[in-house]
Image: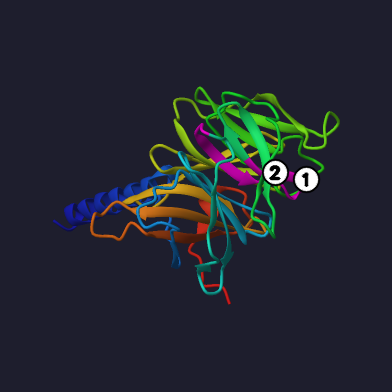
Amino acid sequence: YFLGVVIVTSMWMFALMLSFGAALQRPSATMVLHSGFTMYAKLPLPWLVPAGYGCDISALDVVMTDTAAGCYLASWNHTTGTTSYWAGPYAVCGDGPTLAADLGPNDQTWALCESGIRSFSVDALTGALRTSPSAGLAGLEKFALDSVENTSASVVGLGLRNGSVLGLRLDMSQSAEGRWFILGSFNAPASVKWKQLALRNGTGLLLDQKDRLWKVDVVTGEWNGPQMLPKGYTWLGLCVRPGDSNLMAWGVQDKHCVAPSKVELMYFEWSGFPPLSGLARHRRLT
């Protein structure tokens, strides 16, 4: 009898060890990221449905895209969680749709139109919109630009076209505004459909249609991930904050009872940025 008890107990312990080991070896895609805190950004119009967001090198200035109307601009206060008055909309693409916008190289704000990427600015006194001619890359569906000058990275932008992740480069030798061209296609994870992009200091973050977050080093081409953003949200944009150690994600809850004028801005933090498995819960900034 005693021998039987020992055998059964040993088998149970072995089974527990196997299940524990399997839990440790589960792919990171099963892990859900949790935000340490959430802030709310009020939209310029309560019924607006943003198509995307972008941020500058400090993550203080933001640009919001409405496909039909154009671009809205504002400044973000990370301490109080409020935005300045939204300026806009600016019809950078004229009567055509504005597919995306971001703050990129040379302190310029760029918009993606069907005819290609173009920079724009707003006169501080008159509020007049100034746009440059198209700087190339017609046919892109989304893009993200790197506002940090990285001498080791030839890629200063990421683009999506026909499901492929493209590396973008800005050539300033042809005009004052520059000319964008495609360096090549990334060897990205297969059968993944992308919807949002962010890029800072040579590190790209990509969100797929299943709300999985991936990281790519645009210098080495190394990919890490994925990990899940919280469910129950429609994610509208990503921003890598200074220091390459934390992420902001804009989202709207899918529940109908939530006021549509509130966009939730969630903060996520990880240690050292390398693998996405190092993501950890964020603490409130002081």
Tell me residue 183's x, y (percent): 71, 25
- Whether the magenta-drawn stretch holds residue 48 is answered as no
Compared with residue 141, is residue 43 higher up or lower down, i.e. above or below? below
Helix, strand or loop under label 1: loop
Label pair 1/2, CB-CB below 8 angstroms? yes
Q: Secondary structure at mark 2?
A: loop
Q: Residue at x 71, y 47 (%)?
A: 108
Residue under pointer 1 = 150
Residue interval drawn in magenta: 95-110
Indicate left or right for 79 with 148 as reference. Answer: left
Binning the other alpha carbons within 10 Å of mark 1 as few (below 14), some (14 to 19) or many (20 upward) gives some
**In this figure, which residue is indicated by the disc labeled 2?**
202
Seen at 47% across and 34% down, the residue is 194
Across and down, in percent, residue 115 comes to 60, 26
Crowding at dot 2, Cα within 10 Å, few <14 / some 14-19 / many 20+, comes out as many
Q: Nearer the viewer, residue 170 or 200?
A: 170
Label 2 sits on what residue type?
Gly
Q: CA distance from mark 1 to mark 2?
A: 7 Å
Residue 109: where, in percent of width, then height?
66, 46
View extreme (left): residue: 1
In the rendered image, the quadrant that contains the C terminus is bottom right
Residue occupying the point 84% across, 28% down: 174
Q: Does residue 61 appear in this view?
A: yes
